Amino acid sequence: MPPLILVNQLRYRYDDGTVALNGVDFRLEAGETVALLGENGSGKTTFALHLNGLLTGDGSVEVCGIAVNARNAAIVRRKIGLVFQDSESQLFMPTVLEDVAFGPLNQGLSPSKAAEVALTALEQVGMADVAGKAPYHLSAGQKKRVAIAGILATNPEILVLDEPTTFLDPPGQRALAGLLAGLPQAKILITHDIPFARATCTRAVFFRRGMIQQEGSVEEVTARQGWEFRPRRAE
């Protein structure tokens, strides 16, 4: 099978001259969950934003065999769902159900069908019981699950999660790991949380200075780099 994501020699320079990506090659196969590791500023998030066309650099990016460019952006964004580090940036409607239904509505579903799809996604993440609540009343872990439900409701083939354990306490981290393990989509996790990466990821790549310098299992990559990060404390 062809890879779900294929990136060749991706390069990107910000307007201030900062070189964020300097020749990145990457593949994501069906069924994989891959951790993107590396220091802050090493290019991980910049790389992820290229996967659905939010940024465009030199080189080539393909998602599900489709070239990522301005012409194909709408198609690509149906294939790949991005869950941001701050869940609140994705939650803005009066109720949880309306929030999760927003994506399906924009894909052309009728209001009744969008609500049905949204409720199914909430059930998938164990949040159907808060469908009528306002998002700002939820805990950090609940907001994370609702943000994931909003992406799942659009039926993507790939999930990209940026620092998914931020603001989560240990029980919330364990619950999120269990949730991700049960989802069929291939996944990319941008994380500094090595124990979480070990629990969820089948492979890791290590970014440094805009390039992938190592790849292998989470254990192999962190051992080579001498890294052992602790989970962030909930805030």
Image (cartoon, rainbow, N blue to C red):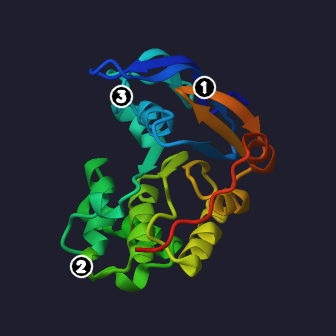
Q: Which residue is mark 1?
A: 6
For marks 2 and 1, the one nearer the N-term is: 1
Residue 143 point in image, percent of width and height? 38, 71
Q: Establish if 156 lies above or below 177.
A: above
Looking at the rendered structure, the kind of residue marked 1 is Leu
Residue 159 point in image, percent of width and height? 52, 49
Looking at the rendered structure, the kind of residue marked 3 is Leu
Q: State the residue at coordinates (46%, 74%).
A: 234
Q: State the residue at coordinates (60%, 51%).
A: 185
For marks 3 and 2, the one nearer the N-term is: 3
Looking at the rendered structure, the kind of residue marked 2 is Ala
Query: Answer yes or no: do the residues labelled 2 and 1 have beta carbons within 8 Å?
Result: no
Q: Which residue is mark 2?
A: 134
Q: Which residue is mark 3?
A: 55
Between 56 and 70, the one nearer to me in the picture: 56
Farthest-out residue, bottom: 129
108 sits left or right of 9 in the view: left
169 sits left or right of 220 in the view: left
Of tags 3 and 2, which is closer to the observer?
Answer: 3
Q: Quadrant location of the C terminus?
A: bottom left
Between 185 and 220, the one nearer to me in the picture: 220
Mark 3 neighbour density, 10 Å: few (under 14) some (14–19) many (20 or more): some
Mark 2 neighbour density, 10 Å: few (under 14) some (14–19) many (20 or more): some
